[in-house]
Amino acid sequence: MKTVILTTRITENEFNNYAKGIVQENITIGQCTYYYRKINIGTENIIILLDGLRLGTSPISIGNLIQFDAQQVHPQEISTFLQLINELANKENFYVDENLIFAIHWGRRDISKSREYTENFKKWVKKYDEKVNFIITFWTTAAATPEPDSEIDKKLREAKPNISDETFELWFDTLKTRDIPLTTKFSNIKHHIMTSFLDLDIDWQGLKEINEKDKENAKKYLNVILEKKSENYYCQKLVNLWFYLTGKNDLNIDNNVTTSLSKKDLPYEKSILDLINELTNEIKENLEKKLQTLLKHVELEIENKNKSEKVPYIIDYLKNLDKMIKDEKERDINKFLNFNFHEWYLKLGDLLEELKSFLE
């Protein structure tokens, strides 16, 4: 069973704009009553839609917890919050574990601020209870937020929301990974990119070293490298790189070469461009400049791919490698080594690391 406790905006009185056709329930703690509506998803999963405005008032006063200062104390606020979660769980029969997500709508269009406030709120919770293992994250309908937040918002505004299991599962996974720092997401994409070119880098270095010592053995080694490689093996690496960077499958190297990836193959289903688009304008602008530098290195551009008459050297190089796979007569050690792929590979890693440093 999976449960999402979803708050309406903590800055607005909008609870009654959601799921009007579902009976309103409440839980009273001390002198404060918290209103919610329970929405069943299929036979097992549920959404608890909680009045966010109430969380901004005493005793929880969540607005006081958006900045973290270890010297300050807020035990009553956190204990009341955890009591509310536990009483909801007891009343609605769900578990307070890793299959529970508490998603706050901070009422801001600034996603980076929503992420910052959520991280600080989690620090307050952990300060008073290290054993908390449910997921605390945020949701928002700001334009830069990836789907399906907006879709869910529209559904919840219906009198009796009808949300499919598939949509719920997608959203649950989105909220779960939103809790992961951007630097971690970026590091995972970088790892996938560098790993995808690693075999070519190793083969290039190995062939160069052998060729300097024994040219006959180098020919044999080249055949070992290329045998059993699939058609367009090397060009597909570049098409996949483009997909990791932009999430797009529109890099036209050759009509027969398309990405072998889909969104589900991307770490957290995000490309680097997707991550950049989630940031505030100032940080986003700086990162976009760094991304353009990286794209210039790999001889690709977001808006002007392959439109010049000159074929980018990396594409020409990888095409020659693919020709060697297809036709043994094309196999030429000099052609394999005439482009310093190792240097290109290391520079790609350095540029990706520079992008990551802007997120830290």
Image: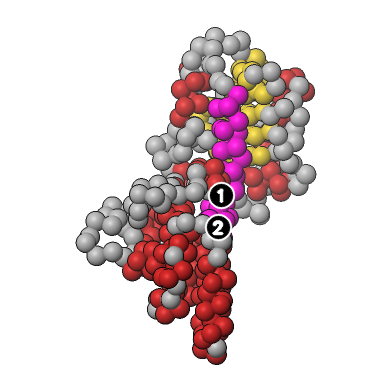
Q: Is residue 92 above or below residue 355?
A: above
Q: Marks 1/2: CA distance?
A: 8 Å
Residue type beneath disc 2: His
Residue at point 61% right, 13% down? Answer: 24
> As displayed, is residue 195 above or below residue 113?
below
> Dot 1, crowdedness within 10 Å: few (<14), some or many (≥20)?
some
Quadrant the N terminus occupies: top right
Asked if marks 1 and 2 touch (Cβ < 8 Å), the reply is yes
Identified at 55% across, 57% down, the residue is 192
198 in relation to 76, above or below: below
Query: Looking at this view, is 84 or 155 the one in front?
Result: 155
Image coords of residue 19 (percent x, y):
53, 15
Residue 123 is left or right of residue 315, and the answer is right
Q: Secondary structure at mark 2?
A: helix
The residue drawn where x is 76% and y is 47% is: 130
Is residue 226 visible to us here?
A: yes
Residue 129 falls left or right of residue 258: right
**Secondary structure beneath label 1:** helix
Q: Residue furthest front?
A: 329
Residue carrying label 1: 267
For residue 80, say whether it is visible.
no
Q: Name the image quarter holding residue 288.
A: bottom left
Q: Is residue 168 magenta?
A: yes
Query: In this view of the protein, which residue sits in the foreground, 95 or 163?
Result: 163
Magenta region includes residue 350 = no
Q: Position of residue 184 (x, y in %)?
A: 58, 55
Q: Residue 323 in the image: x percent, y percent?
A: 41, 64
Magenta part of the protein: which range?
165-192
Q: Which residue is mark 2?
A: 192
Q: Three-letter amino acid code at disc 1?
A: Pro
Mark 1 or mark 2: name the one nearer the start of the chain.
Answer: 2
